[in-house]
Every structure is written in C-alpha cells, then in structure tokens.
Amino acid sequence: QVQLVESGGGLVQAGGSLRLSCAPSGLPVGWYAMGWFRQAPGKEREFVSAISRSGGNSYYADSMKGRFTISRDNTKNTVYLQMNSLKPEDAAVYFCAAAQVATRYSSWFGTTAAEYNYWGQGTQVTVSS
C-alpha cells in the first residue's frame, strides 16, 4: 500500500522559513516524478513545484520562484520543499504527490494535479504577519 507522508509544516512568522519533507512508503521515490501542491481555505488546489524522476529538472509556480527550492534524496526516499521568505499568502495545506514515470521519461515532471497518481494527506503551513 502506497502512502505519502508529509511533515515539517507549522506556524512561522512572515519572512521565516520552513522545510517540508515527503517520505513515501511502499513506493521507491526514485521511480517517480514528485510534486508539491497547496490548497488554502476556499481556494482551488494549486501547483507549487515539481522535480523530475532524475532530479535534473525542477519547476516552480511564478510566485514561488526564488523563494522555494525542491530537492530529492533518493537514498533516503525523501523529497523536500525548502520555503524561505514566507508570506501570509503562502499559508495553506501543502500536499506531496507522486507520478510514476518510465525511465525514458526521467526528465519529465507534471504541473497539474491530474498528472499525479498518489497523494499525501497534507501538512498545514501557517504564516503570521
């Protein structure tokens, strides 16, 4: 059974930092492109960042560029999202997602929720002003 477990959320002041982790079980993360999405109350789930299976390609939503960094450590079967210079509008539940990708597509990553097969339960990020 595949489970994606996010951790690292919490309360932080504006301008602060958090590092989210996603540790899948029952899923060798090295076979998957990974993504982060977020959903604030009353809003649609939105794309945050993604990283290819190979780790060589990553992508960010415009509002996260320069502030967030996605990375992966396949030896620890973990994907990270380092979030710096947090703003109140970054407050949301952050979700980790995995998309199984064949080796020949190892540089691919997805930017829409429909492209991902597995999802975590989310971790809450709250940013105080």
Image (spheres, rainbow, N blue to C red):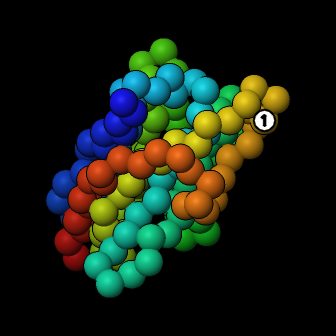
Q: Residue at x 50, y 23 (%)?
A: 28
Image location of residue 37, percent across then percent down? 46, 59
Q: Residue furthest right?
A: 104
Query: In the picture shown, does residue 121 fall above or below 30?
Result: below
Q: Is residue 63 visible?
A: yes
Residue 61 appears in which quarter of the rendering? bottom right
Dot 1 crowding, Cα within 10 Å, few <14, some 14–19, many 20+: few
Image location of residue 117, percent across then percent down? 53, 47
Query: In the picture shown, does residue 125 fall above or below 41?
Result: above
Label 1: which secondary element: helix
Image location of residue 49, percent across then percent down? 55, 54
Which quadrant is home to the C terminus?
Answer: bottom left
Which quadrant is home to the N terminus?
Answer: top left
| Pick the front one: 102 or 49 | 102
Q: Residue at x 33, y 74 (%)?
A: 40
Is residue 68 left or right of 17 when viewed as pictured?
A: right
Image location of residue 45, percent across then percent down? 44, 70
Kind of residue at disc 1: Tyr
